[in-house]
Amino acid sequence: MTRSGPGEREPAIDALRGLCLLGIAVVNAPWIGAGASLPLQLGLHFEGERLLALPDLVAAIGVEWLAEGKFYPQFAALFGFGAGVLLSRGLAPYARRIAVLFVFGILHSIFGWWGDILLNYAILGVLLALFHKAPPRALLAIAIAAYVGATVVSLVFDHWFDPVGGQLTEGLAHVAEETAIYGRGTFWEITRLRTSEMMAFFSQYNWSYRLDTVAMGFFGLFVGRTGFVSDLKARRRTLGFIALGGLLVGLPAAALPQMYIPAGDLVAVAYACLFLWLAARGSLDGVVKLLAPIGRMALTCYLGQTLAFTLVFYAYGLGLYGQLSAWQCTLFGVSLWSAEVLLSRLWLSRFALGPVEWLWRSVTYLRVLPMRR
């Protein structure tokens, strides 16, 4: 793996972003289309109410333990890292970029999926602009404070990840209501439900995510300001120690639903460091080359995943809402991501930017950028 020069993209970072999209796909597929969420399915299983077949049990435990809450923090850190670069180029284009991202988030929430994360990144972008000139120690302090805050809010207010008792009955009633609309409703009935669920998620149930996004975003800005990734080969030992420590502490803790936020962040950082450690050793040159294109088109592929999921699951598409089991949803997510890997490589062999990235940058710089290479 060669060292990137000033202003150049680091292929390993792009590849890491592309790998994160795999985690997003396998987590979002059941949330968008399985009817009962995986935490609810596991709650029903261990309460003896609705037993899962072995393949579904393995898939549900694997996704919840190894993927749920482990990849959006990496995207937040990468967002913070990139924001530092963009802010150094001028505040006006950066502000336009964040404004467009906010619009993307609104549209994605209403016409795609209520569990959108782009709105949180837009809010994060504003905070990063306010504090980007702070010294690295201050950025790290903000990250730690937000991390503690996210953990406290999650432990006190979030119960979706560990449904028990009466919450199982309430969850099943909610599933029945959603199935009636997402599975058999019209496009506008589905859109109204998405909008109401987005408003509830964003205003009531999203504070732990929001604070965690802030924590990881400031951590990414801190990493960028310290120049840590400027030469990954020189950081191999540190990357390896962080990866090992994060996995040894984070994975056992992540088996406890209540540790969703704190353990999820530890594992997320460990995953990223493990990938970059392997890339710095030259062990992943082929993987980096394969995944860098999808990482460069991450926004297009993220929105594309939602489009594909909704067209397959919702009534205005194939209408398979609630009909795929846990392992089938997992396989669907992996298959869709694999297709995106190939399509991204093909697209970027002809064009310089992904279609959504092209629109985003064109608005940011107030001129129509060339699309073809």
Image: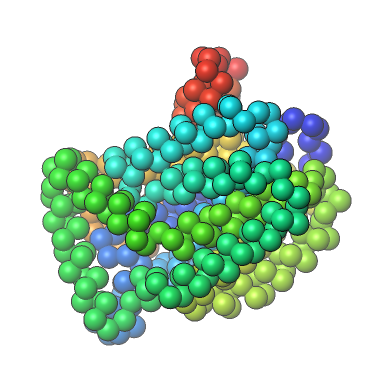
- In the image, residue 356 lies at what x, y percent? 46, 29
Instruction: Indicate the position of residue 346 as horizontal and vertical percent values.
Output: 53, 28
In the picture, the quarter occupied by the N terminus is top right
Do we see residue 168 in this rendering? yes
- Residue 178: x and y in percent read 19, 58
Write the residue at 31% across / 51% down: 198
Q: Please give the name of the residue rendered at 65% of the width and 28% of the height, measured from the top-left corner.
A: 90
Q: Residue at x 53, y 47 (%)?
A: 124
| Frontmost residue, 322 versus 10 | 10
- Left or right of residue 96: residue 104: left
Q: Quadrant of residue 60?
A: bottom left
Query: Which quadrant of the figure contains the C terminus?
Result: top right
In this figure, what is the number of numbered marks? Answer: 0
Between 359 and 314, which is closer to the camera in this rendering?
359
From the top left corner, tell me how far across and down residue 181 is, in percent: 15, 52
In the picture, measured across the screen, residue 12 lies left or right of residue 123, that is right
Q: Nearer the viewer, residue 264 or 252?
A: 264
Q: Is residue 31 left or right of residue 292?
A: left
Above or below residue 75? Residue 252 is below
State whether residue 278 appears in this view: no
